[in-house]
Each structure stands twice: as structure tokens, then as C-alpha cells.
Amino acid sequence: MSELLKRSVRIFFTYGIRTLSLLFAVSVVSFVLISASPINPVQQYLIGLGTAVSPQQRAELEDYWGVNEPPVQRYFGWLSEVLHGNLGESALYRRPVAEIISERFWNSFALMLCAWLLSGVMGFGLGCIMGMYQDRWADKILKKCCYILSAVPTFWLGLVLLLVCSVWLKWFPIGFSAPIGVRSEDVTLGQRIYHLILPAFTLSLMSFSNIALHTRQKLSDVLSSEYVLFARARGEGKWTILRRHGLRNILFPALTLQFASFAELFGGSVIAENVFSYPGLGSAVSAAGLNGDVALLLGITLFSAVFVSFGNMAANILYGIIDPQIREVEA
Amino acid sequence: MKKHKTAPNRRTKLVIWTSIMALALIAVYILGIFIPDTAVFSSFLNAKQPPSFKHLFGTDALGRDIFLRTLKGMAVSMTVGIAASLISAVIAIIVGIAAATGSKAADAFVNWLIDLVMSVPHTILIILISFALGRGLKGLLIGIAATHWCSLARLIRGEVLQLRAQHYIAVSRRLGKSHGWILTHHLLPHLIPQFFVGLVLMLPHAILHEASISFLGFGLSPEQPAIGIILSESMRYLSAGMWWQAVLPGLVLVLMVLLVEQTGEHLQTILNPYSVQQ
Amino acid sequence: MEQKDTTLLEIHDLSVSFRMYEHGLKQTDLQVISELHLTVSRGEIVAVAGSSGSGKSLLASAILGILPENATVRGHIHYQGEELTAARQEQLRGTEIALVPQSVSFLDPLMKIGAQLDGHRRPRQTEKRKNLLRRFGLPEKTPQLYPFQLSGGMARRVLVSTALITDAQLLIADEPTPGMSLEQALEALRLFREMADEGKAVILITHDIDLAIAFADRVAVFYAGTTVETAPASDFQNGSKALRHPYTKALWNALPQNGFQPIEGFQPYAGALPNGCLFAPRCPYKTRQCMENNPPIREVRGGEVRCWQFEHPCDEREVYHGT
């Protein structure tokens, strides 16, 4: 097991350097894009405040965004602030961005975790069924469903679910009846879960076809392998083979894929949160974009990149755990 | 029904099917473009009508015919999708060839670049690009184009690497042909089918992204009848029971995306010579 | 009558073909085993010997009933006097009939050897497993290893052990010895002999004719998907005169110790099989009859052979097989 740990640490460092370079590049690109926009972060922040702004406050803001400095210096000044944990002040919410992110992330995290687990379990289960009944009617129908689902936009699916489950059947609340930016302190856990079910379900439906089709393919590869032929020769039945050999060989690749899909998950949550007016990072980022809240937009972009690299790192470590075995077999 | 003595082989059938689907797509597109703006007029007398023979998809809160708006919106979405895919596919082919024929460092850089694009959720990256360019069509186009080239670039890189290993290319090089000559005479002819298939397969994603981003409010302006905007408007009237504005345009979008997807897959089977043996 | 009691496995006119699709919807049948005959009695080791790619492994799959779904099987297989139906095959796999597979790729790459030796049946044969490992000289930690950690020779011994750990009456060993050292191979073959002596039977599928002659009781010569001759192993020691079929004789002459004369031509590919006798295109003694019809199987001098030269009525005593 210590061997495994060592390997994981090695992978962690090799990919860690690459990840850091990518994060650095993301920060450069986002800062350049923000700078290119016609919106001036200082002006935008001051618009709502009118004359109530003190010269000192203004100076602080100009200092944060490095208004009077050349671009490269401006970037590094901003970066050092970011690295010190200062993501600036949101023009929309009048609060520090870091505070908003840390607060809303837990909402998004709950949503994404539920969707992630749900899509993983559903996708894996259905993928197994498709693989076991390959080219039979169950497989054909499910495969068609997966293809159709991949052509359905998240926001429309959310709309239809909202229409059916909330408006017609009245099972769930109509998300957007709550104002954007509702104070989280006033919401109970039960309410929270109640508000979570439909968005999480929508989000999971979006990503499950990918994992299902992948699992199906992997399982069908396993089932046509020589070791499964041998298992059959030893009298193992269909389901024994799935239990003893199938799951063992497809679970890790599926998990790896699930971790590697954090980008789609986050992107999907932006849409789902907007449809359901769910108070997470996704609804904040679009509100920030629409209202010219530069600091918040930048903060969430950076945060999403960190979130995605976290998933990729997990995927790489997972892959690295099984990879050496495969490599040695081939050698 | 007329019965054929010899069943037409799969390839012929595929070509026929693909042509029919492509024609259907073009028909919707042309229909959408040629519907005059005056056909989609507001009329408060007709507001919020459920679907009927007069208004197939009903009317919206301003009394506009949703069916006509949807068709127009579909044409707009497809125009944006095609333009963005085209830019994206050109980026992909340039980057792919550069990675495969350039130095090792160029290859590593391209891989790193792909990782970079993949390391930010695309929805957020498009929002950011759209924000930088002051929203609207330009930001949407560039945003979608900037995020969709990665997988095609990888494919083309692999293809070029494989082609470069072929004997006739080595022979050409021995004969003293220049890089450019080999590129235009040996590589590009092989890559053109890949390019078109990649383009068509990219299109559904581009259309879906366009719709999502317009839905969020970063894409086309509210006056334009994009599908995303129609659906975004529908949210306001959802609880009032105006289901038609939410359901029907979305259904058309899904159908069109499926149609494009199928066409792309069929095109791939037709243009890929190995498919004949399958 | 006594013959009937000791016969464990009888294969009559077994043909296996695969449905293939080429050029769109055109369907063709690819015949890989044609009208194969083989009997295996208790207490003996029967070698099925033939060159690589002649479909020997498919014979094992056919007996076990684990051919791919697009395969069609014709003919009869009887096990202990009863027809081997799909349902019965399912029952017998891994209990009465065990397979020793060809290579390490038949082991689950992510499962420890111990679990693979034990199989899915309960109770686990822990004692037997220990004894087997000891006899094969496998290290005690072997059950804790993964397949990729095994050397080639270790993997072979593990594969043989997976079959020996069962109480199977019939063992089908598909090329069990390559990769083993001489002693290990001898140990494996000694274990097979012990099994046979206990009244069980072994089918040894091999491309190594020397091995077949040395260790088997009878040798079935496999050519292009059929057995052209089944002869007692001793006949091979007595030289080509004792053998029956032209291919067997040619094979014998091709052995290094017997002159190393190569056989001209190639084995026909499945899908391009000749009409008559499968060996006819390469046979120096072929007649028009050979080119037109496949000869029936005949018992000749204590062996079985499929060749038209034994069809002359006064030449040999004829025993008609099958219906």
C-alpha cells in the first residue's frame, strides 16, 4: 500500500506543476479578457454608490485594479492580491468576492455533488445494463435515450421539468419565485433539500449519458475479453461474471471519467442554477457578467478553474493507480 | 409498396438518407431566413394564445406567433452555429497540423493549450469572452469558436501523424518536395473529409451552446428571435401556464440538433472509406 | 459393451461455422471446423495436434459451449453417453469439464491469483490449492499476486492449477506447456497422467507433435478444421509406415529427427476450403474422387482415418461409423 501512496504522490507532483502552469495561464487570460472589456471595474463599482463614496475608498479601489499602472504591473499587482486571498469587492453584492464564493460554493457544491453522484450511479447502472444486454432491445432503447438526451439542452430540460413537476404536478417549488441572492441564513435544511432535488436531477440527466455510453463500451470490451471467456469456461454465469470481473474492470475507468467531467459539471450548474434561480456560483457568475461585476466574474472564473483542476488531478491519480499494472502487462 | 429485387446496398441507402436530412435542414434554414420580419408582429389582441391551426405553437405575451419566431430563431442559431463551427474547424486544422508537423515543443505547446481550454468550464469561458467583447453576436461567435476546436484538433493531429508515417510521403520528401508541396498534395486532400465531418459533428454542440448562452443573456440581443431568448422569455410566463412557449420551440431545437447529429454521423460513415467493409 | 462404459467423450461430425457479414448485408458462413470425429476414453490422454491457426482452440470452446454468439454448431457431442446440450454444458463447465487456457490473458488482470485459483464456487479448496502450488514449485505468496506480476512460467503453472483444483473428469488443456521450463512441463504432464490414471481423461491440444507423441496415448492429427487421423502414439514411434493418412506421414517426415522434409503448399484458410478432401490440394496421391468428395472416417489398424485410399472393399475391414 505504501507503494501505492508513493505512486500517488509522484503523480500529484508531476501533474501539480502542469496544473499550476495552467492555472497561471487561466489567470492571465481572464485578466486580459477582463481588461479588454469596455467596462471599467472602478467606475462600475462606484456607479451605484453615487456621491457617498469617500476619496479613500476610491483610492483603494484604483489601487486594487492598478488603474494608473502599465498592464503587466497591473496584472502582477492584482495577482499578488489574489494570492493573498483578496479577490476584490463585488459591485453587485457590495461584499468581498471571497466571502460570496465561499458562501455560495457550498450551495453549488451540494447541487453538483448530488448531480455527480446521481449521474454516476445512474449512468454506471444503465451502462452495465446496456453492456449486459448488448444489441438486445433494452440496450437499443437505452442507447437511443442516451443519444437523444445528449441533444437536449440543459436549460430546456430544466424548463420542462419545472413545468411538469412544479407548475402542473406541484411537487416542487418554482425555483425562480425566490429572489436572486436570498440570504442563506433564513433557509432550513429541509427547504434546502427540497429546492435541490429538481436542479440536481436536471444536472445529472445532462451528464449521465456520457458515463452510461462509456460504461457500456468498457463492459462490452470486458465481456469479449479472453478472461471472461475463461470465466465462462469455468462455469461462471452472466451475473457472476459481471460481479467478479465486470465491475472490477470498469469501475475505475468510469470513476476516472466522472472526475474528469468536473468542467462539464460546473458549466452545467451555471445553466441549471439560472433556470431554477438556485443561489450558487452559477447564478452568481451570470449575474456578475450581466451586471458588469468584474471582481466577482474574475473570482468565480478562477475558482472554477481550480475546481476543474481538482477533478482532473483526482482523475489522474486514479488513472495512475491502475495504469502501471496495465503498462507492466504490456511490457 | 414497390419491392426491389436487389436491395440497395447500405452505402446508397445512407447517401439517400443523408441527402434527405440535409435537405430538411436546409429547408428549415431557408424558411427561417425568408420569413419577413413583418410576419412576426406584436398584437396585444392575440397575446398568450395556446397552439391552434392559426398559430401552430401559439403566441407569446406580445402576441407574436411563436412558430414563426422559432423558425427564424432556428435560422439565426444555425447561422451562428455554422459560422462558429467553421472558425473552430479552421483553428483545429491549423493547430492540428502544426502539432503534428512542427517540432516536439510545438506539439507539447498545443497539448498544453488544449488542456488550458479544457481547464475552465466552457460556459464560463464563453461568458468571459462575451463579457470582454461587450456581449452580442461577436462575443458569442468568438466564444463558441474558441472552445470547440480541441477534439477536432486532436483528431487531425493523429491523422497527420499517421499520414506522415506512410511511405509515399517519405518518398516525396526524398524526392526533394518541399513541406508546402507535401502539405497541399498529400496531407490536405486526406484532411478535407475529416474537416467537413468534424465541422458537421461540431455543429450540434455549437448550436446548443449558442442557445444556452443566449438563454443566459450573454448572446444575441433580446430583439433577435434566437431560440435561447424565446425560451428565456418563456420562463417569465411558466407559472401562468404558458407551456407552449417553453416546450415547443425547445422541441424544435432538439429535433434540429438530432438531425444535424445524425447527418454528421452518416457523413462520417460515407466519407470514411473503411465503412464499406463493415 | 465395455467400450461404451469407458468412453467419456464422443464427438461425431462436428462442424462449427461463423456467420460473417461482408460488403454490407451479404452474409457468409465461415466454416472453421468440419465434420470432426474424436473419442476420448477414461484413463487416457488424447493429443489433438495440428499447426497453429487450424482451429484447435475452437474445438475446446465447442465442447464447453462457449463459442461466440455468431457461431453455428452442427453434429453431436456425447458426454458419458448422453448428448451434450447447451443446458448440460452449462452445468458441466468448471465441474466435470475443465479448461486450461492458452495464455495469461485468460486471467483477470485486476484479480489476485488466489481468487482466480479458487474460482467462484464454494467451498474453497484451500488445502488442494496449497498442495498444487507446492507441487508446481510456485512461491507461497503467489495467491497474493496479480497476473502482471507473474513470470511466463509461473502464469502457465497457475493456469494449469486452475483446472487441476477442480474435480473435473475431463480436462482440456490448450497448449499448456510453452513457457514452462522442462521440469515444470514434465510436472504438469505428470499431473495429467495421474489424473488419467485416476480414471479421468485429458485432451491435450498442442502444435508440438513431439510432445503429443511422447505423452499422449493417442494422437488426433488436426488439419484445416478436422481430424484426418487418430492413431495410437506408438504408431508414430514405429515410423511413417505405421501411420495412415498422407498428411500424418508428411508430418512425420517433416520432423527434424526424421529428415526434416517440408510439406509443400499451405493449409487452406477457413472460408476457402476445397470441395473434397481438405488435404487433396497438397496430397501427392490425390485422385479425382479426392477432389470431389470428402472421404468418410474409417477404422484402420486400430486407428481412425479419413482418406479415400482405404475405401477399396478388400483392403481393410470396414466398420461403418455413425448413420
Image (cartoon, rainbow, N blue to C red):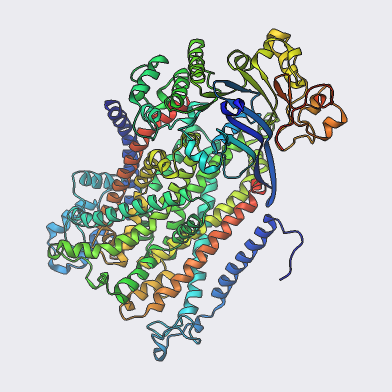
Q: Position of residue B118 (x, y in %)?
A: 39, 47
User: Which one is nearer the viewer's eye here, A191 or C46?
Assistant: C46
Q: How many marks?
A: 0
Identify which residue, B79 or C315, lies in the foreground: C315
Residue A35 appears in view: no
Residue C62 place in picture, x, y as percent: 58, 36
Q: Nearer the viewer, residue A82 or C83?
A: C83
Please identify the quarter of the rendering in which residue B163 is found.
top right
Most extreme residue toward the right is C288
Q: Check the image and name the residue furthest to the bottom.
A: B45
Q: Position of residue B62 (x, y in %)?
A: 39, 84
Rendering coords of residue B49 (x, y %):
41, 86
Residue in view at x 53 percent, y 55 percent = B201
Q: Determine the image quadrant of residue C3.
A: top right
| Vertical position of residue A9 compared to residue B123: above or below | above
- Please state if A242 lies on the left or on the right of C206 as rendered: left
Would you say A283 lies left or right of B75 here? Answer: left
Quadrant for the N terminus of chain A in the image: top left
User: What residue lies at 67% left-to-right and 48% top-to-bottom?
Assistant: B276
Q: Name the image quarter holding residue A158.
A: bottom left
Left or right: A197, with B258 as reference point: left
Does residue B199 appear in this view? yes
Q: Examine the rendered structure and indicate whether residue B228 appears above or below residue B54.
A: above
